[in-house]
Image: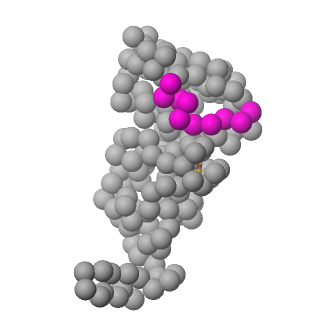
Amino acid sequence: METEVGNKRWHEPGEQVEVAVWLNGEQVVLATEPRKTLADTIRAAGYTGTHLGCEHGVCGSCTVLVDGRPVRSCLMLAVQAEGRRVETVEGLALGEQLHPIQRAFHEGGALQCGFCTPGFLMLATGVLREDPHAGADKVCERLTANVCRCTGGVPITQAVLAAQREMYGAGE
Ligand code: FES
Ligand code: FES
């Protein structure tokens, strides 16, 4: 039950609310609690490709795109996504056909355990969409937003640059 006192409103603990979002191009209604993060909410809805590492905005494993821009979904409440476009790693491939960035990670050995990979894939997708001809230095700098504990940054950056060449030609 929603309670209203003066200009403040709050929900009872455990109370569910509905959040309508465009998730990977489809309009869906997610059931969640007002206190729950976007990460927890999409994972509970079955989109478990979004990984949770630190859960406080440091590692970037939970990165998704919101209205086309990389966002740490552990720091965003699900209710803040109402009406917005959310993209997760599940939306990258076209059926059996991997996205060029996914293929470059696979072919370039840009993962070991793979825990950080969905976050890097979404970060790289957002970075290249925002600036398709970004130079190697800029791509490298933007990728430092996320943390990989086992592969190291070089193969990941090389994979993203290879995908960039395939998708857009060389960077600046
Ligand atoms: S789990 Fe969100 S930044 Fe680490
Ligand atoms: S591949 Fe293991 S943490 Fe990045």
17 relative to 37, above or below? below
Residue furthest to the left in view is 7
160 relative to 27, above or below? above
Q: Nearer the viewer, residue 108 or 76?
A: 76
Question: Where's residue 51, x and y in %?
Answer: 61, 50
Q: Is residue 144 magenta?
A: yes
Tell me, yes or no, if residue 19 can be seen here: yes
Q: Nearer the viewer, residue 29 or 39?
A: 39
**Residue at (49%, 48%) from the top-left corner?**
72
Question: Where's residue 146, x and y in %?
Answer: 57, 37
Q: Is residue 122 magenta?
A: no
Query: Toward which corner of the image does residue 6 lie, by quadrant?
Result: bottom left
> Along the horizontal axis of the image, is 116 left or right of 76?
right
Residue extent of the magenta highlight: 141-150
**Residue at (43%, 15%) from the top-left corner?**
135
**Residue at (50%, 38%) from the top-left corner?**
122
> In which quadrant will I find the N terminus?
bottom left
Question: Where's residue 144, x and y in %?
Answer: 55, 30
Tell me, yes or no, if residue 95 can be seen here: no
**Residue at (30%, 87%) from the top-left corner?**
4
Our reading of the magenta stretch's main secondary structure is loop
Residue furthest to the front in view is 6
> In which quadrant will I find the C terminus?
top left
Question: Where's residue 152, x and y in %?
Answer: 69, 27
